[in-house]
Image: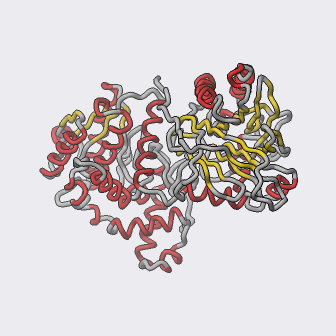
Amino acid sequence: MNLTPRSSMVRNTNSCCLSIFPPDTGNRLSVVTSIKVAFGQTNPVVGDVAYNLDQLMKCAEAAAGEADVLVSGELAISGYPLGDLSYREDVIHRSETALQKLVEASSDPKYSSLYFVVGHATLAASKSTHIQSSKAIAHNSASVIHDGKLIGTYHKQVLPNYDVFDDWRNFVPGNQELIFDVNGTTCAIAICEDIWDHNSTRPASLRKAGVELLIVPNGSPYTRNKALERRAAVRQFQDGFAVAYANLSGGQDEIVFDGGSFLINQSGVEIQRADFEEGCFYDLAPELEPVKSDDMSTLWKVLVTGLRDYCRKTNQTKLVLGLSGGIDSALSAAIAVEAVGAQNVIGVALPSRFSSNHSITDAEKLAANLSIELRKIPIDPVHKAFESALQFSDLASENLQARIRAVLLMGISNTDNALLLSTGNKSEIAVGYTTMYGDSAGGFAPIKDLFKTDVWKISSWLNARGDTEVIPENSITKEPSAELRPDQIDTDSLPDYQTLDQVLALLIEHSATIDEVVANGHPRQLAEKVEGMVRASEWKRSQGAIGTKTTSIAFGSGRRVPITTRFTQL
């Protein structure tokens, strides 16, 4: 498995140190000390502590002589999130052993001026009592290392228990500060959720203790506009001290850590910012543009990274997917090519008696645009064989076609040792406009958290960003259709996607009631219909493939809704 990070060394000829001003004096003119921070923005593999430690040491080599302190992301040694692996003593012991190796390595003279602040798991002195039935045995920790010595260890105090985060279930909370000195600068540590507690009294306590720089290792996954939210949280938590915010980079199952580590000085001005990619970043940029709302470029990086790292970390090298000629499979194929290379992507056209001519020609054009292999397997002979064995209802016959395609795609998946991609979008998955064990089949669903309108937007952006067409224009502009019966279009069964996506966003991402959907300008009958479809489709979603999370509420581990329920306002 090749997990060598791309070179991501950021340099700036105008680089300088973070100036630290004396606390509580009001004097912002005289510099007392200065400190230079490097971010070790690694892409850890959960459980592979040897690999993770190696990546941290590469960052240390880059930072040596360039920075005073190297800061990693949250649980950079063990990987994050650990889930219930945090209950295993052998997993925690491996993390502790790797930490000790890092302590020993720091005694090398080339690191003599470098302090390490590294995220890791550590065995708790006593079992957790914050939940009566908790099995938690470990802390989510960060340790300070310098010159062959472990200076001290801080344990995360605020343990999140929402969305994809289960720290409250998996870890024992800490309750002690760790304050230490780096070349005359008084530093302290907080870990991720610690600074999102807006009612915390810690900022005032830290200021009172004379803290000048708060170092914050994070495992903060991407959702749209999260970069803006992080900075707002930091500035709300600040109380006269600078903040070094270090994030992880890369994909882990359904989530993507989007890097973007940053340094904000005591006045709340951002003076250092890392890129999306993994690597070591240590130079300041005094004239940074303000962070803006996410653009399509960031979303594209997230989609590609999510699939790429899922493949890299699970030893998948090839991908296969059905190409219907529609926009969903076209965008999924484009993501696949960017993630693993065109030579490792197999496209399969599976026309039926109901497929239009443009379905085939659009699939052919896409394959040519992406330079991928295209196989064509008409399904009508198999369809007729089933029909000769059993008389199907109209709906069963439609679903049968999707399931025949799935069987053939899975056959190719097994034969060619290629991971099958499911190409459904969030709009279809939300209302159950999918066939179980048919088009829902697959090991990863790269666009499952994109509404149909998002699929159109990013496909158009993809075409506009270069000189050549990627997604065939006809795939973008034609009427969406499952083509499972004559003259079928999606709006036979669904509202138009512009309207549907607005209602779905209210119901799913804003937890709106039907009354609130109506108050936002949508007919009650429509709101009730869509809400009912969402509720009735929970059983399908519970069996679906994981896919990259891009929104605050995705259909994944962060959304837990009963399948059997009669509550009608979900």
* The image quarter in which residue 148 lies: top right
Q: Position of residue 324 (x, y in %)?
A: 24, 47
Q: Is residue 407 left or right of residue 45?
A: left
User: Residue 83, position in %: x, y?
Assistant: 64, 38
Give percent across and percent down for residue 530: 43, 67
Quadrant for the C terminus in the image = bottom right
Is residue 524 depicted above or below 486 in this figure? below
Quadrant position of residue 450: bottom left
The one nearer the camera, 523 or 418, is: 418
Looking at this view, is 277 or 487 the one in front?
277
Q: Residue at x 54, y 66 (%)?
A: 510
Query: Can the viewer see residue 47?
Result: no
Q: Residue 44 vs residue 457: left or right? A: right
Picture coordinates of residue 561 (x, y %)? Answer: 57, 56
Q: Is residue 196 left or right of residue 336?
A: right
Q: Is residue 366 visible?
A: yes
